[in-house]
Image (spheres, helix red, strand yellow):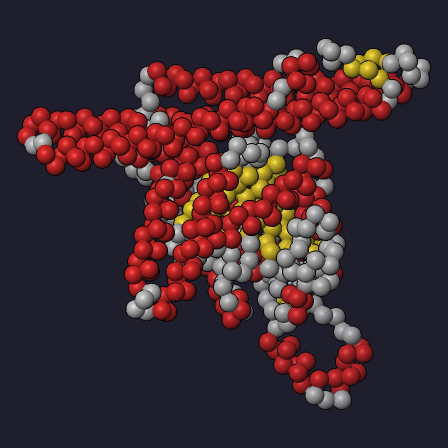
Amino acid sequence: MGYRQLWAVDPGAWRAAGAAWRGLTDRVGRRADELSAGAAALRADWSGGAGGAADARLAALRTELTTVCPALIEADQVLAEFAGRLGAAKARLAAAVTRADGAGLLVDRRGRVAADPARAPASPRSGQVAAGVGAAIREALALAGAADREAADRLGALSAAARSTWVAPPPPGRPPPGATPAAVRAWWAGLTPTQRRWLVAHEAALVGRLDGVPVAARDQANRLLLGARREELLAARRRLLERVPRRPVELAGLLRVERALAGLDALTGRLAAGEAPRAYLLGLGTAGEGRAVVALGNPDRAARTLTYVPGMTAGLGDVPGELGRAARVLSRCAAIAPEEETAAVLWLDYDAPDFLHEAAWPGQARDAGPALHRFQEGLRATHDGPPGRQTVLGHSYGSLVVGTAARDHGLAADALVFVGSPGVGVAHAAELGLPPGQVWASTAPDDVIRLARPPDELARQALLAASPLGVAARLAGGPERELWFGQDPAHPGFGGRTFPSGRHGHTGYWAADNPALDGMARVVLGR
């Protein structure tokens, strides 16, 4: 990989090529359905030994056809990740050339750095800059070359598998319920590539939900389940449509299903898009309000990963909007550090409260704790190379989910961030189990969450307001740091660190002109 080659390469073209391979899964699915329909028609009119043999052969053909789907998705993963690393290498190269230009230096078509005779004469300082620019160019070329070799090797392995044994059943035994992500990772590592492909194709529901299975395999499995999950929602809608005329109370359930369907269709559209960063589907459920875990970028490969936990009312219908918030943090990370490989995960794998009377209690946050703990442990277990920096961010009730998980179970995280928090279930940052200085918070001056006082505090204020002491108390202006679920994490007495937010209310922390967005991105990057 030379200087001219990297300067001219178009990462988007590789990304589009990957999307084209992945797009073949829809065609394969249609052909498989046609085989099934044809076999059913034959089965109805053809019996006996020959009919049975034909039916078995058609079933085998359908299986052979569908087992290619994980490989088509894998080709997309390889090419999208290659495009991402090429983009990072190009960003480094562009930064080096910009630095050279600012110092009056020229970079030739081979990437060699020299003084520009048409500008100021060379100086000892320019020699130092030239050496630094040359080193940066070599690093960019090395990154691009490594990415090229790795992508070629991965695609070569896929090609070799297609020419030989594509899938093979794994040995008996699956990770028992409650197995740790580390144990799951060890089990997966002990399988051959053909056995892993078999599991993705034949036991997608198991592979897709197991923390400790690498992100790529979980994404392949969950994408294969998209059609079945949509059918679940369509079946629920049909049942509710039949009941609504007789029981109008079912209308609320019908509206919930319609909203989940719209959210799932929007998510499917994002998964099908060839845009950067590539989305990885790590979990999907249709029960209740619906759940989803979606990564933008591959956390197993990223040096920095954000896990974002949304708050009250979040469900499958909200996934597009919530994923947009994660994407805005990721975009700001790319603007600050384009050379860094960063990923962001929307973690909506809990039953978020829908009404204020539900959000007033910590039960749903406590119930979510084990799952969030396992997910973060899974990210640690499956990460390639040295451990990446992991940040967990909770908004509103989601901050209570994060705080409760950290307090009760521990979180594999290098930093915690709370925005618009009603309290995180502890009185001091030290109770969250992270090193000093790695707990961050921000609350907008006009965020209504500041009014979420604990019940006993509300009663006290009501009594004071009805007495002459109330005026004196208001004039004294005592420290307002106690919120509904404990101490305010954005208060200096909590022991964490803070970053500013503009006046954007409870949901505006991700606004483009809000300094909170920059704050979140810098914490994710460790800056």
Q: Is residue 346 above or below residue 189?
A: below
Q: Is residue 176 above or below residue 122?
A: below
The N terminus lies in quadrant? top right
Query: Farthest residue toward the left?
Result: 48
Instruction: Answer left or right for 48 relative to 291.
Output: left
In the rendering, at what x and y percent does residue 422 appear?
62, 64
Asked which quadrant contains residue 97, the reply is top right
Instruction: Write the residue at 66% across / 50% down.
Output: 510
| Visible residue check, residue 409 | no
The C terminus lies in quadrant? top right
Instruction: Answer left or right for 34 relative to 444.
Output: left
In the rendering, at what x and y percent does residue 345 appear?
54, 44
Instruction: Write the residue at 83% across / 21% down.
Output: 101
In the rendering, at what x and y percent does residue 509 appear?
67, 53
Asked which quadrant contains residue 205, the reply is top left
Q: Is residue 211 above or below residue 163?
A: below
Looking at the picture, tell me which residue is in the foreground, 96 or 492: 96
| Visible residue check, residue 317 | yes
Instruction: Write the residue at 51% across / 56% down.
Output: 314
Query: Farthest residue toward the front?
Result: 245
